[in-house]
Each structure stands twice: as structure tokens, then as C-alpha cells.
Amino acid sequence: MNKNNLIERKQYMQILRDLKDQHIIKVITGVRRCGKSTLLEMFADELLQSGIKPEQIQFLNFEDPDIYTIGDWKAVYDHIKVQLLPDKMNYVFLDEVQNIDVFQRLVDGLFIKKNVDLYITGSNAHLLSGELATLLTGRYIETNILPLQLAEIYDFKSKPPNLSKLETLAAYLQEGGIPEYYNQKQISQKQADKFVESVLNTIIEKDIFQRLVIKDKHNFNKIIDFVFDSVGSFVSPRSISDTLRTHGTIIDKEAVARYLDAMCDAFLIYKVPRYEIKGKGLLQTLNKYYLVDPCFRKVRLKREMSKDRPHWLENAVYFELIRRYRDVLIGKTGNLEVDFVVTDHEGYTSYYQVSWTTENPETLERELAPLNAIKDSNPKYLLTTDIDFNPVYNGIRKLNVTDWMLGNK
């Protein structure tokens, strides 16, 4: 985003403030263009404002072609090392560090220096796999960055005076929270959509095809389309393979599983397993996948999303929950499904059911049934777009989902 249009990202900035000067690597991960680089830039600016001298800060973006003129990892290490102030704490930011070959040795070499406070970002989960994970076990903290939430977009745009809660939410479910999208939209909607399409293509080409060495791109694209069109539905590699087979696409379930893992590694989709509430254990069959931002589906499938709003509302609630809580799972109680089983950072459990509207008494009864079937006394919530003064049904609180997402409930 433009410097004049920056959003503080308060939650993530506070994490960096709390970890500052601690001898531990701060690893920032997340899908491309969700705001990782901007977050580090804002934190570096804050350091300057606090009295840190510019000479104590080094910021290297490894997607910048000029960086490659420095050379391999050892040359980059030497480049950084000679600029370190020996009697001061030095703040080193390595943006998209996985683009440097053998970057693990660069990171490890800097980490062992007592006067280096190290921050790295990456757009693929492979950043924390293999050798780096072995080298740095117990020596890093990962923070996964998500696109803007609804409350942050309010901060950015300010609430339009004549936009209802429902219209505000509907716009968010279609446009999502990729920050630069909103800058491009000020130019034109076409420009904004082209920007999102280019980001998605980069994710697919750089973070998936190149890293997984996928040769059958046609079938992979079929999987992407299927998953984007199945948000909020239970799927498995076998069910996807079987469904595509009926449409003439032959791809075995093992390949589907690899492709799904690759999309998760690129933070494009998030896999959520099912949890048996009574038996207190994870189930091995069928999961749900949620798309990190709905704008990717909008430009990929080029369909109106109004008919799928219930699923996209569920998608948005999932990402709001993982911003706030430690663990989020899909619940199962008997033959009934609970949309989300949540565990907070103190270990307490709560349950969430999501429905576009429950104005119809039959719909209300259906949505309350899974929560009523849970016999423990943990908090239970029903989130809808209805505006009916937050009634309580047998201990289950019904909340307006827009108010809840904005932090008003």
C-alpha cells in the first residue's frame, strides 16, 4: 500500500514489539501480498522513531533484482556482516529470504551473533522445513500473517455513511483483504482485478509449480478450480479424484493430496480437520479447506459470489477465529456438524455455528441442533447476518456477525 494509506496491523505489530531484542528469530510467513514486507517496514520505521540509528538497521528484499548482484548466501552474509555496528544491537530484516540458495546458512550465521536481532519473511511453508527447521529448532517464533480483516478495512476506508451492515459484509466477502487491491481499485475495478490475478499467478508459478516441480499443470489447475469452488464443503483427495473423474479428468488421489499440500504450503488455502467432540480426538477422513482471500476466487472463476455467500461467510469467520484463538477445528457430535470448535490461548473451549440467516424457524432449529447436542457448559455462539438484539436460546448466544467481526461483541 502507499505510505499514506498504511494500516498499522496492531495485532502483528504488538507481537514484534514484544519480541524485540529477544535472542530468537522472528519468522513472518503468509501468502504473497498480504502485508509481510509492509509490516517489517513499519516496524523498522518505528525503531527509527524510538531512537535507533539508521546504521543499526539493514533491510534486504530478496525479490529485488539488485540484491542478486551481491552474490550467493556467503556474499550476502559478508555484505551484512561488514555493516554491523560492534557495540550496538543491529536489526536485520531479510524479506523473502527463501529466494537465496542455501539461505539456511545465512540465517544461522546471523543468528549466532549476539548483537543481531533477526527478522525474516517467506511466502512458503518450506521456509521452516528441512535443514532450517533442524538448525533452528527452538530458536524461532513463527507469526503467520493474514490479509486485512474487516475491522482493519474499516480503519483504512472508514465506514461509508450510507452502507448497511449487510452491504459492508457482502462487499468484504467478495473483495477480501489484500491491501494493495484497495489502492488499485481507486484507479479502476479492472486494474484491481488484474492486480489480484497477477498475484495469484505468481503464487501458482513461484510458490507452487517451481517448488513442487509440477509438470501436469493442466490437472493442477483443475484441482485449484475445484477447491476454490468447494470452500466450506467436506472433501478428501479421494472424493476430489472421484468427482473429477466423472468429468473426464483422470488424476489419482495421491497426486491430489500432493497438490493440496502444495497449496497449503503457499498459504493459499488452509486445511481444517474434523474433531470428535465427545471422543475428544481428530478424525482421519474428510477435511475442509478455506481460501485465504475470496478475491482470488473472484478473479479465478469469474462468477458472482452472491449465491455462495453462506460458504464465504463461513470462510471469513474461520480466518477471524484463527486471528483470535490458538486452535480452530471442525466439530462433530453424533451425526451433526459444529462449524467450529475453538480453543483459546488459556486452553478454554467454545463452539461457533455460522448461518447467513435464521429468520426461518426451521433454519434456526437446524442451526441450533448441533450446539444443543453438546452437553458440556462451554460457551456456544450462533453467528448470522440477522439484526435481532442478540437473543439467547438454551444458553446459546446469537450474535450479528458483522458486529462480531468488528469487535463490537
Image (tube, grey):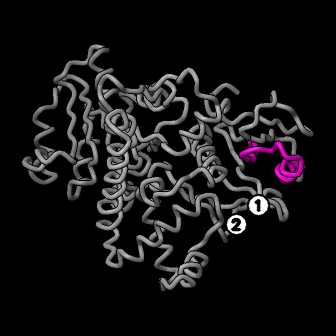
Decide which of 86, 210 is in the foreground and name it.
210
Which amino acid type is shown beneath numbered disc 1? Glu
Magenta-drawn stretch contains 352:
yes
Query: Magenta segment, which residues?
Result: 349-372
> Tags 1 and 2 in contact by the CB under 8 Å rule?
yes
Q: Is residue 265 above or below residue 160?
A: below
Which amino acid type is shown beneath numbered disc 2? Leu
**Left or right: 69 with respect to 174?**
left
Residue 339 image point, x, y percent? 72, 52
**Left or right: 273 with respect to 187?**
right
Q: Is residue 131 above or below residue 138?
A: below
Residue 337 image point, x, y percent? 77, 58
**Left or right: 53 with respect to 187?**
left
Q: Which mark is residue 276?
A: 1
Residue at 51 percent across and 26 percent down: it is: 154
Residue 277 image point, x, y percent? 79, 56
Location of residue 4 (image quadrant): top left
> How many angstroms separate mark 1 from mark 2 (CA)?
7 Å
**Quadrant where the N terminus lies?**
top left
Closer to the chain start, of discs 1 and 2, is: 1
Residue at 39 percent across and 31 percent down: it is: 22
Residue 235 can be seen, yes or no: yes
Residue at 11 percent across and 43 percent down: it is: 78
Q: Which residue is mark 2?
A: 283
